Amino acid sequence: MTVAAPTKPKNLKLVYQRPESLVDSATHYCPGCTHGIAHRLVAEVLDEMGLREKTIGIAPVGCAVLAYEYFTFDGVEAAHGRAPAMATGIKRVLPDRVVFTYQGDGDLASIGMAEIMHAAARGERITVIFINNAIYGMTGGQMAPTTLPHQVTTSSPRGRDVATQGYPIRMAEILANLDGAAYIVRRSLHDATNIRKAKKAIRLAFEAQVRDLGFSMVELLSTCPTNWGMSPVEAMEWVRDNMVPTYPLGDYKVAPELQKLRV
Amino acid sequence: MTRELMKGNVAMAEAAIRAGLDAYFGYPITPQSELLEWMSKRMPEEGRVFLQAESEVAAINMVYGAACTGARVMTSTSGPGISLMAEGISYIAGTEVPAVIVDVVRGGPGLGNIAPSQGDYRQVAHGAGHGDFFPIVLAPSSVQEAVDLITEAFDLAEKYRTVVFIVADGSIGQMMEPVSLPEPRAIQREAPDWAVTGAEGRPRRTLTSLYLQPEEEEEVNLRLVRRWREAEANEIRYREYYLDDAEYVVMGFGTAGRVALSAVRAARAQGIRVGLFRPVSLRPFPYQAVRELAEKAKAFLVVEMNGGQMLDDVKAAAQGQVPIRFYGRMGGVVPFPDEVLDEIHALVSEPPTLDEDPRARWLDNMQRRMS
């Protein structure tokens, strides 16, 4: 059966379409996972800034390992946790390109802790999209450095016991202390209002890069319904009720040049 | 051409700059640190990239990123740093991007010491990271040869889209010798057609070492093997000394080969028909040339600054055709020519048998010497 392509009705303005930076395909992400939303926000921002053809994205190891498949700009795939170092190598030889990493919590806050800290300390002109869903997704739901106290995972089956398994790491707060950082904020993807705020933050993070202000990172509180054992709706509510209190949303560092900026 | 007295590490750094290096990323470790220091001074002077990374892990991943853009890029380190870089080296190999790595080898394992050693032979030539890949490995025996090989290393890395190692033991890095440096080459500016540079006016490009379908990964693996066979056919390098009429053949690479050459000259002066075979490409290893020597020679003497890591390749090449004696100094001890001359005398006076294990006799001798 063939279906005629929809024609654009006359006198109507097109206000919503797939960003040019995003590939027209289904993703491998689970239903209710917020990776799709984060991908789309990045794509929209790069389109709006006219940066698609100048951008090089760096995928992590984790569920977003194939992120480069979903964008129409150039991409590379880093070793686990090393995306900020790889981004540094790219940005230093191509300083007029836009370089960003897309990393999960295990990648960025556990195995890649040294690389993210030093990229920020050096003030690398890169942007980091940090997906914090408090769990290792791809490997099957193990405890992450961001797992909440008492949260049950496949490697903390009795719940994360802080006495032996330590406490959650708040990356935005830590990185904001480094002089090389120009823009460090935390947002959430659990409802429409917060998604709009997240998009604005992603815009400002890329603005920090193109304005040569320093390192920028947007931490995005995200869901993992599959490994949390929840429905998509329950997962969104769990972010709101459990993650937001542990990981307060807000601006942790905003360079003065960005404070005046209206986007 | 004018010659300058230069330290090996500095000469290698300057040679890389003249070979058109775009970017250097590294981390301090003895005995290679002068290379990094020279880069920190000279690369900014040339308007190129120098960055001291937070670790060897980060340094190699910076190299990886820069290599993906088609830039000429290198790093340098010593054994413990190679261990940390193994992850990134494997990714570079799997992504098929070119990079040059200088390993100024020190004594090991573990923290070992900072004296010259050849203990990284196996790690670099037979390992270098997880998975199936073949780095090209070149071993200089003088500062001049190190300079010449650096220049060549970039061409090879780009030709085969692979990792090329320069394995220079600590003495090559630390000693000063007169060298003539090549004329500076123009920096290559045209990005190769696989490079990730931003999808301006063209479809996107992606560079990855991830192939989830086993058949797809196998295709990549086979491509790497085919490319390696091409390197085996074209890139074998070795030097021969006094081999035309030699009855006995000494084998050694790098500094061990150079020390052995002095011993061979002394033995020749005493009328012993002995020559030296010095592999320069440790990978691809000159198996065929060694095999041909095995058919002609009465006996081999393999000399190394390790426990016989190249010895195993020589044995594989010789295929039992020739008796082999082994002499190794380890732990950062550099053999004197006289020691090797004694070994040549022993090779002639008490020849090894075809079925003996060269390591067993060597260990017995070392035991006697120590007690």
Image (cartoon, rainbow, N blue to C red):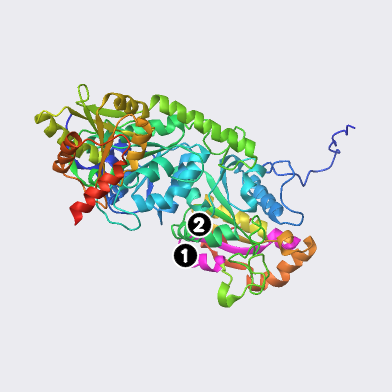
In the picture, the quarter occupied by the C terminus of chain B is bottom left
Q: Distance between the residues labelled 2 and 1?
A: 10 Å
In this view of the protein, can residue A68 be seen by the observer? Answer: yes
Q: Which of marks 2 and 1 is nearer the N terminus?
A: 1
Which residue occupies 53% across, 51% down?
A83
**Residue B361, how many percent across, how many down?**
26, 45
The chain identifier of the residue carrying mark 2 reads A
Q: Position of residue A121 (x, y in %)?
A: 45, 60
Q: How crowded is mark 2: few (under 14 residues within 10 Å), some or many (20 or more)?
A: many
Q: Which class describes the residues within 10 Å of circle 1: few (<14), some (14-19), or many (20+)?
A: some
Position of the N terminus of chain B, as image quadrant, is top left
Q: Quadrant of residue A139?
A: bottom right
Label placed on residue A43: none
Please, what secondary structure does the residue beneath circle 2 have?
strand
Foreground residue among B18 and B76: B76
Q: Which chain carries label 1?
A: A
The residue shown at (54%, 57%) is A216
Q: Name the residue under label 1.
A: A178
B125 magenta-colored: no
Look at label 2 and name its amino acid.
Phe
Res. A183 visible in picture? no
Front-lying residue, B310 or B64: B310
Image coordinates of residue B134 in percent, x first then y, are 45, 37
Q: Which residue lies furthest to the left in this view?
A: B270
Q: What segment carries the magenta color? A: A171-197
Amino acid at circle 1: Leu
* Element class at badge 1: loop
Residue to which mark 2 is pinned = A215
Residue at 79% from the left image edge and 63% from the top image edge: A233
